[in-house]
Image (cartoon, grey):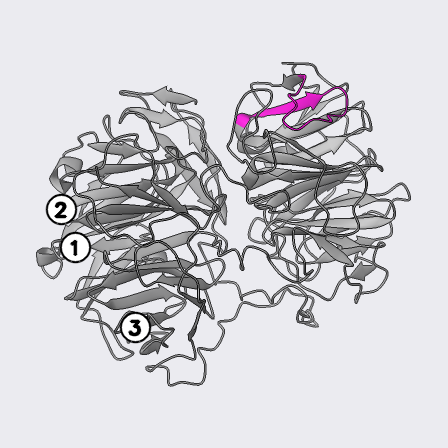
Amino acid sequence: MLYRRWLSVGLLSWSLVGCGADPVARQNAPPVQDAPPVHTPIRGTPQAPPPPDGQPQGAPPSNGMPPQPVNPPLGTAPMDGGADISGQMTGGSYTAVSDRPQGALQTGQAASIVLSDFGFGQSGGALSFNHPAGINSDGERLFLADRGNNRILIWNTLPDSNQAPDVVLGQPDMQSNLAGDGLDGLNWPSVVMSDGVRLFVADTNNNRVLVWETMPTQNGQAADYAITDQKLDWPWGMWTDGTRLVVSSTRQGMVLMWNTIPRGAQTPDVVLTAGGKFGTPRTITSNGKFLMIGDHNARDEASANGQGAFVWNQFPTSDTPYDFVLTDPIDGHAAWLQGAINDQGTLVALGATVHVWNQPPTAATTRPDVTLATKLTGGDGADVALAGGKVYVSLYNGGRVLIYDAIPTTGDAQPIAALGSDAVDMNPMQPAYLLNNPQPYTDGKHLVVVSDFDRTMHVYTSIPDQSHATPDVVYRLPEATWDGELYDGTLLLAGHALYVWKQLPLKGEAPDVAIRRTADLEFTDVRGIAYDGTYTYVSDTNRDRVMVYDGIPNEASTAVAMLPVIRPTRLSSDGEYVVAASTEGGNGGFVTVWRTADVLTNPQGQVVGNSPQIRMNLPQHALVANGALWIGDTGFYRVQMWQSIASALAGNAPDVVLGAPAVDVIPVAPVNGQDTLYWPATLAYDGSFLWVGEFKFSHRLLRFDVQ
């Protein structure tokens, strides 16, 4: 395991741009990931929820502009009454906690169970994909980068049904998924390609490209060597024709090009910068003549929300300017375009859906010849492969690979099958009860888990004591909720609306309250909420303040206090203190603390931030419980804890750190282990169990038990 020990070293600064970020490391700070992008823009108007796969999407407006974001209705109930929301009982069962442990958490301890996953180090099987990403073929075989399972899957013949792969790389067998950094290991691989002889894998979190000089035929077969370079940093995209190699260095904001395949560490021949317009370049589409680089944080004004693809009509041989930026032709806010080009020059690319250009576009205004009428859940890392006349579409957020029997020629083309799912229109994560961005809430007797991305809520009527436990109740929410609170049987969820259950919904009951606004606040994009029985605190992120209301607010309520704080996100209160995380607050982020007794008379809080003894990077959640402070240190892959808030405010080092072996150690990379963390973000603590929800590129919910 790779760690870095630190004492008094420089700070880390991250500046968010749109949905992602550009990290800037100073002095001896460890390498860090691109800021965890949220699934809808942090700034600006929230996006409308996408229709499920297979359902028609709205036609673009006649003015050519992308569809405008809207808030879905809350249902037929009065706005200040119960919304048209109810849960469904699953009929599942699980082992529940019978004896609650007493004691304290220890630095570096292992988690006891994991929810929203199949188990520690378990993939779920050969056809259970965890955010499938890059897909490629050499015309005979099919290759898939199964990102979250840290593996490459190989089908020795081109599949036309949901058939199991023949070979797995990065793991000893089809059931395992632990990350590794040896030549036989992988950590979050993004792309796999072959020139028909060799196999190339962009091993993203290990900052390298692995090369097999002959086609691997055995499970777990080690690569022959790794390509590295000091500029090769978090490679998301890759392309090769067997002679040239092009790799994106996503964290460095550049694309590296070698005129011949390097062996080991070798300086690239060309470093492509797009004239400084790259933000975090991701995927690469090319046929050796045309080059398209997808970017999540493009700095060209033609990109929408930073999403765009830089295009060179002629393959560059030096750092030449790009010709234009291409965005999704029907939804400029959709993920950047990524695809494949066949020998006839047909480009098939995925954004909001599949688009087909009979020849690569030569300008930003070149419309596709075919656009499918169905919305597809692609997202960060989706890809397309063309082989044997078929089209394979990897749905990163859809948990499966769609198979089309030919390149679509009409908008109503339908897939013939899916890899990873028995139904082409079913995301297999849902029946497996896996959630993206799990947010836990607990009172020590029950557990509620909410996903903003999936717009789903799981309710456990008891505390589970086994991994991969099936929830008792499942809710499908009408919109994203970013934060919540469970206090004395009352459940609050907030995002684009405020939902309140006055009693915990253990049998699928509808909320008692559903409002979109108070007298002085629109619930357009609320990122944090807390309730302590006296006050409700609401993050008004875009106005740099926390609103304080007496009791639970209604549409007529006016705040009794406003607490100034830079871009507050998730909140927490234990009745004595209220704390706010400022994920984007600058200088790596920080946490602000107020005494609840002072919020009406002294709105200025005290800050816990980066100092000689405290290091944090994009803290997404600060939790206060019985005077102790917990911080989900997302960008440094750990959770920090101080036994007293006073100690944290004094700048002292944390008393306990989870995800690292010592309090002065910062992991170099996120790892999906039992005693390591992968972008920990959300926290819940009941005195016996600490629940930690991982964010964006992992969907685990881990439980740590006091000892």
Cα distance between the residues tagged 3 and 1:
19 Å
Cα distance between the residues tagged 2 and 3:
27 Å
Residue pictured at 60% horizontal, 47% vertical:
128
Mark with earlier residue (3, 1): 3
Viewer-nearest of labels 2 and 3?
3
The secondary element bearing badge 3 is classed as strand
In the rendered structure, are the residues bearing label 1 and label 2 in contact, judged by CB atoms less than 8 Å apart?
yes
Question: In the rendering, at what x and y percent does residue 582 appear?
Answer: 31, 47
Mark with earlier residue (1, 2): 1
In the rendered structure, are the residues bearing label 3 and label 1 in contact, judged by CB atoms less than 8 Å apart?
no
Q: Which residue is mark 3?
A: 501
- On the rendered structure, is 161 left or right of 535? right
Q: Is residue 594 positioned above or below 174 on the image?
A: below
Between residue 318 and residue 434, name the one nearer to us. 434
Between residue 460 and residue 681, name the one nearer to us. 460
Instruction: Specify start and end residues of the magenta stretch as a single range.
Output: 206-224
- Amino acid bearing label 1: Asp
Q: Quadrant of residue 236?
A: top right
**Labelled disc at residue 627:** 2
Q: Is residue 462 positioned above or below 515 on the image?
A: above
**Labelled disc at residue 574:** 1
Look at the magenta stretch and give its main secondary structure: loop
Q: Quadrant of residue 629?
A: top left
- Amino acid bearing label 3: Trp
Residue pictured at 50% horizontal, 33% vertical:
178
Image quadrant holding the C terminus, namely top left
Mark with earlier residue (2, 3): 3
| Magenta run includes residue 212 | yes
Number of residues whose C-alpha sits closer than 10 Å to that of mark 1, classed few (under 14), some (14–19) or many (20 or more): some
